Amino acid sequence: MSSGRWFMTFCPACERSNMFDREQAIVQWRQQMLAAGISSPVPLEELEAHLREDIEQQVRAGTEASRAFEMGVRHIGEAVELKEEFQKTGNATRMFLRKLRGSLLGAGEIPLPALDDFEPAARRTLELAPEEARHFNHAFVGTEHILLGLMRSESKSLSNVMRRLGVGSAAVRLEIEQIVTAGTGAVGSTTIPFTPRARRALRLAAQEAKSLSERQVSAEQVFLGLLREGGGVAAMVLKKLGVRAESVRAEILKETKARRGAG
Amino acid sequence: MVRKELVAASAEPLILALLDRGESYGYAIIQEIKARSGGKLQWTDGMLYPVLHRMEHRGLIKARWGESETGRKRKYYSLKQDGKRAMEQHHEQWSLVHDVLSGLRKEQYV
């Protein structure tokens, strides 16, 4: 999928409605890059830093933000071509070592909490998330896939929290599907890595559990972690649906009390 | 506008020479080259990064993550010892080409 095709459909629309959202546009651009196989964190973080710098300079020079974004994306170039160039970087040995390290450590620098640290529904979510990624032909598990996994995890306590917040799982799925574009090629049978944002979100979830001296991370804490991470697709969707971290935390406390009272 | 092949071939010596003046980052490198060539040396911005990564992999330059004045993440590159040597080699070779070319041209007009 080329970066050209989507901003043709995306940018004119937001210019017309006069509601250009720079952050959302950058998130979508990241999605395109990831879907084309530009990996995260390196080199995608660096390309994103470049794009932001370019937009900032253009805006400072008086260019309208949406136009600056469009030009910035053009300056960076097509994801497919970049991918080919980046592939020339590593030689075979390096690729092999990276794969080996990846399978030993789990690819990124941010370690994932152990699977045992999650309650059954949350654990089920982490198994469903890669399934969701495959469904979109994405070679990465992002915050959006975890959120979709949560919606399918059938966690009783999470659905209680969501009901009281007035958020429906159908609405969440719909919002995600509106933002995320499917990749073109099917993803192979290898393990799909979690993106740095997804890892960060899961660590934040673990932090929430720890602050309540809970032994395991619940599904609703994963939900809160996604929201607190702040920059991923999941956080963007939840914020758009009016979900706020403080209210989620308050609802989780109620849920915990009810559970402890019952147990 | 300078031809694509020449732009590609000159990327490494230009980056090395630029980093020899001090550490820098992708966006600034592109701007500097653009300004110094009067906009005639045009890189597709994104294409600079694979070149930088290859040079890093070959041990010519090293990278570190830092921050911009506004607190945004930024990856800075600087020259390593091997990069300095590579720069000298490039310089010799490009000077040679330049000398031969200008020598031939001079003879034409003598």
Image (spheres, helix red, strand yellow):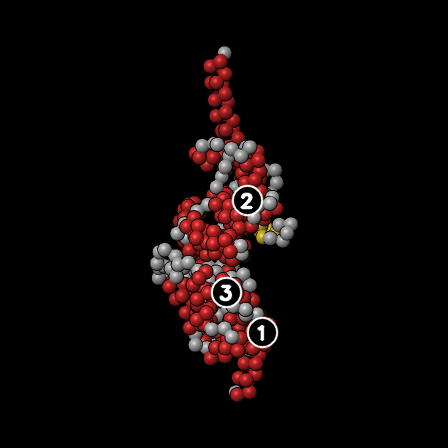
Residue B93 drawn at (x, y percent)? 49, 29
- Of residue A17 and residue A77, the one placed in the foreground of this image is A17
Q: In the rendered view, tell whether residue A35 sits above or below residue B104.
A: below
Q: In the rendered view, tell whether residue B2 sits above or below residue A122.
A: above
Residue B53 drawn at (x, y percent)? 49, 46
Q: Which residue is mark 2?
A: B26
Q: Chain of mark 1?
A: A
Which of the two discs, 2 and 3, sits closer to the camera? 3
Q: Which residue is mark 3?
A: A237
Q: Amino acid at mark 2?
A: Gly
Q: Chain of mark 3?
A: A
Dot 1: element: helix
The crowding category of the residue bearing disc 3, from other C-alpha atoms within 10 Å (few below 14, some 14 to 19, many at least 20), is many
The disc placed on residue A247 is: 1
Which residue reaches farthest top? B110
Distance in Å between CA atoms under marks 1 and 3? 16 Å
Q: Amino acid at mark 3?
A: Val
Distance in Å between CA atoms under marks 2 and 1? 41 Å
Distance in Å between CA atoms under marks 2 and 3? 32 Å
Q: Quadrant of residue B3?
A: top left
Query: Could you tell which of marks 1 and 3 lies nearer the N-terminus?
Result: 3
The disc placed on residue B76 is: none
Query: In the image, A211: left or right of A103?
Result: right
Contact, mark 2 vs mark 3 (Cβ under 8 Å) = no
Residue B62 drawn at (x, y percent)? 55, 46
Q: Chain of mark 2?
A: B
Which residue reaches farthest front? A16
User: Can residue A203 be seen by looking at this rendering?
Assistant: no
Which residue reaches farthest right? B69
